[in-house]
Image (cartoon, rainbow, N blue to C red):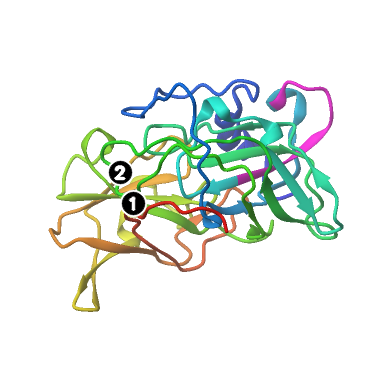
Amino acid sequence: MKFRFHILLIFFIPFLSSCAENDEEPQEEVKQDDEKPQGEVKQDALVSGFFGLDNALPSLLLCNQLGGQLDGMPVNFKFPLDASSLSETDFEVLDSLGNIHTPNCVSLAPANENGENRTVLLLGEFGTAVTNPPVEVRVVGDLFTIDTLSGESVCSAIINLNGITTTNVIPLADGPSLFFAQRIDGNLNECNSGTQTIQVAWNGGVTPYISGDTESDLFQYYVGYSDSSGVLIPHVPISIADINDNDNFHQLCFSTSDEIVKISMMANTVEDPNHDPNLYSEIDVGSCTPLTSIE
């Protein structure tokens, strides 16, 4: 079992106040069409699955269904999702023996603020950590992204994710890593100081690993890099925002006017709810790249 039960409640119940309902804040400045276009997206839009829990979550409490203990798997996307199109039948999980599993329930919460909505928690039976782990996640239903919000550096569009897959399924025993970063400003920016804000996301929930640290102390372990003629110049954030909300997103507040193009995090500074510390992790800051069709 990867997670201690009392920590599960802290981290995962906010995901699942109701798996049948997806209550999140209304999106800002999303183009609403009477009919959603049938666009397609690059396969890398589905970044990873994270096998976070093995028979450790109560089905009745979290999915409002009779049954035993469930697995939990955050699934991470490059682009924000339309919560109104989200359903457990949008997903299939393939285990190493070739069995196909459909989640009992799914949710975007608690990472469902404007500018987030990139991590879906799947609850169900997806295999066994040691003998038969999950190896692939598939989108098999009409799950849509939303259009780019004002203040985001990564562009999106209203497109259908049906048909994308990933075999990048992180094993149960591994610690967390960064999967996404973008520059944000305007109403999405929660920093109270600095000249630019970089939003980062982990593939699962994180808390401080170093004894005595709080989440507000984590800024000192992140490093942002600007590019000076091909040479990366390091910058340490002056503070951190979007904390203490039990999700996998942080906002890093920088005082430099040089454009931050990459973020890294020192090893052994954050941990997942099983107390597995992170390895060194880095991610490029995303920019607006037009979406292309699946070949």
Relative horizontal placement of residue 88, taking residue 113 as reference (left or right): right
- Quadrant holding the C terminus: bottom right
261 relative to 90, above or below: below
Characterize the local packing of mark 1: few (<14), some (14-19) or many (20 or more) Cα atoms within 10 angstroms. Answer: many
Closest to the observer, 230 or 57: 230
Badge 2 amino acid? Glu
User: Residue 182's mark?
Assistant: 1
Start and end of the magenta stretch? 63-74
Residue depicted at 73% across the width and 43% down the height: 92
Which residue is more in the foreground, 283 or 44?
44
Q: Which mark is residue 252?
A: none
Residue at 82% over, 22% down: 66
Which quadrant of the figure has residue 4?
top right
Kindly state the secondary structure of the residue where label 1 is placed. strand
Q: Locate residue 90 relative to residue 270 in the image: left or right.
A: right
Q: Position of residue 276 (x, y in %)?
A: 59, 58
Circle 2 crowding by C-alpha within 10 Å: few under 14, some 14–19, many from 20: many
Residue drawn at x 71%, y 33% is 89
Disc 2: which residue:
152
- Residue 148 x %, y %: 35, 39
Label 1 close to label 2 by CB (< 8 Å): yes
Report if residue 166 lies within the magenta region.
no
Residue 130 position (above or below residue 116): below
